[in-house]
Amino acid sequence: MFKKILVANRGEIALRVMRTLEEMGVASVAVASEIDCDAPHAIHADEVVEIGAAPAPESYLRIDKLIEAAKQTGCDAMHPGYGFLSENPNFAEACEKAGLVFIGPSPEAMRIMGSKIESRKAMEKAGIPVVPGFQDDGANEEAFLAAARKLGWPVVVKASAGGGGKGMRVVNSANELPGALSVARSEALSAFGDDSVYLERYLDRSRHVEIQIFGDASGNVFHLGERECSIQRRHQKIIEETPSPAVSPTLRARMGEVAVEAARAVAYRNAGTVEFLLDPNEDFYFLEMNTRLQVEHPVTEMVYGVDMVAAQVLTAAGEPLPFDPDRLEPRGHAVEARIYAEDPAQGFIPQIGPVLKLRHPERPGVRVDSGLAEGREVSTHYDPLLAKVIAWGEKRDIATRRLRAALHEMVVLGVNTNIDFLSDVLALPAWHAGELHTGFLEEHLPAWKVTAHLPDEALALAAEASVRGTPAASLGHGQELPSPWSTLGRWSPLEKG
Amino acid sequence: MIVDIRLSLNGKVYLARRERAGQITLVSEDQEPRTLEIIVTPGGSYAVKTPSGFHPADAVRDGDMVWVRFEGRTYHFELVRGTRRARARDEGDLSSPMPGQVQNVLVAEGDTVEKNQPLLVVEAMKMQIEIKASHAGTVLKIRVKEGDQVEAGIPLAELEESP
């Protein structure tokens, strides 16, 4: 087993990885940019190395600095988390060259699956259905137009080198195509340094369903079920769940088999996710493969009862897993809500501000992965994902109720978040009915506004706080003991006599 | 010290008056004034007293912004210009904090009064506001009589300080 691992990330995922390392008796090293030196992940680690100025290209994306930090602190392995360099084959290679074990798949697997064009080719070769599309780097506008006509409208233009909705444009007719191609190319160039684009048929009312796969140390590849991630805004997920309301055991077996095939096609090791689009006819098409841990991995962990990060570390160390993949028995239902610093009433624009007041939900069956700390600033330098709240329940509606209750008790003041929006999404009849598809939010909540109704109590509180400011805890501890006065809900004085 | 507070939320302006710490009266055109009690819990957060008990809540001020979290919703207010401290009674102002009507004149010129003794009652926005003596002394002048309309901030009486 490794002695010391550098976690090449920040925020809630860095913290989450470190917590598992701590349990495993492995020392952790954090890296922090100038503004993150007092961040929770930097404080929690056994050691921290400062790696540069706030902007990610000067710190968290600096392969040289990360390797240097790992060597300097005597690490034997590197965990990339997700985002940043987690899917960068150059980083994986640099680690290997420096004698550090990269906790993830091989650089080769990352290269193939990291290119949308290459991965589609590999899938087609393996006989795996892909979303009908057209890819040809040398194609001119006319060729794209002919291809689009053949695919059938609407089509979507996508960037080969990236994701997250960047360089992506839906096109409804021929006259929109030239403009869309041009805009997508320039967006892709600025986001990924590569303006290659390709076309796909746009599958309307389809669901985003992904399969968690894992390749263990002995070369065995298996899956841990699906996650439904159709609740998205700007092609970015905000609510995920397992199991999917649309996936029967038969469909799960089929999709799982195909996902495992896809992973085997690139000799995949460690954790990965194969993403599909599932259409209303139960036909599914390969979308892409993510060669890393996913943001939404906690829902799988809660339903399958496994620690994916521990599995990653054990596999990278050549050790067997603490569970038998053939004996995994998923139980119940889990739903995750992603807490973002953004204003849902203003097109989800990222928000900045100080975290003046923070309270995380605390109740049985609820897990919170958070990078938030009271007194810190949310800045624009990094992804606005602040925290994840995950609820488990025996059934989907129990998990939903529990998640809503958790969001209800969560407090983040000082910076705008999407907490109330998430709560409202989970209250929609369409959510309850499980009628999900990637256009769900546009269909059911296109123009969300902050509640118009203002209770007297909220107004009175604002008035009192405007004069008094923030009351200091009279216990003299200065900060944040979760007090029963604020967490237990309403109370009444006992009647006298 | 009594404070008049104006807060805006979603484009609407709301009026509140803080009589004393933890006592807030909400004033609006279409409703009777409502007074609510707010306490600070030993844990350092707020709670609002309602007929059904104490509701825990959180509120913080950040410059001109006031954030409130109550019953699972977040409210993001802005303090509006015009919020001002009503002149402190012990500054000897003896004015009405709001426009209204003189309901009672309780003393006469020449009377000796104690500190905080009520001198006049003004009815404003359906509230009774007692104008109290800012210090012990002699009533020099009463400038109004019952039934008079008064403006905010204009002294209604004069007191001479006792030696």
Image (cartoon, coloured by chain):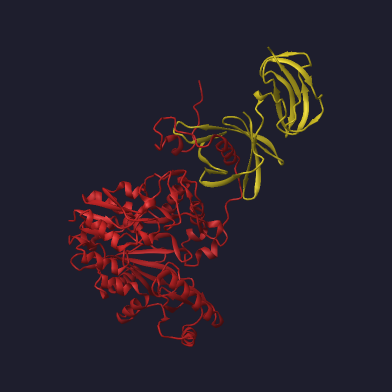
Chain colours: A red, B yellow
Left or right: where A202 falls relative to B96: left
Q: Is residue A222 visible?
A: no
Left or right: where A370 falls relative to A22: right
Query: Image point 58% across, 45% down: which residue?
Result: B77
| Residue A300 image position (x, y, % from top left) | 33, 59
| Residue B44 image position (x, y, % from top left) | 46, 34
Q: On screen, B66 above or below B108? A: below
Query: Image point 82% across, 28% down: which residue?
Result: B148
Q: On screen, A488 above or below A55? A: above
A71 vs A170, nearest the viewer: A71
B77 vs A352, nearest the viewer: A352
User: Quadrant of residue A248 in the image?
Assistant: bottom left
| Residue B34 image position (x, y, % from top left) | 65, 35
Number of numbered labels in the structure image? 0
A231 vs B45, nearest the viewer: B45
A57 vs A420, nearest the viewer: A57
Tell me the quarter of the image containing the N terminus of chain A: bottom left
Query: Image point 46% across, 45% down: which residue?
Result: A409
Q: Is residue A398 visible?
A: yes
Q: On screen, A267 above or below A323? A: below
User: Quadrant of residue A10 in the image?
Assistant: bottom left
| Residue A237 image position (x, y, % from top left) | 43, 62
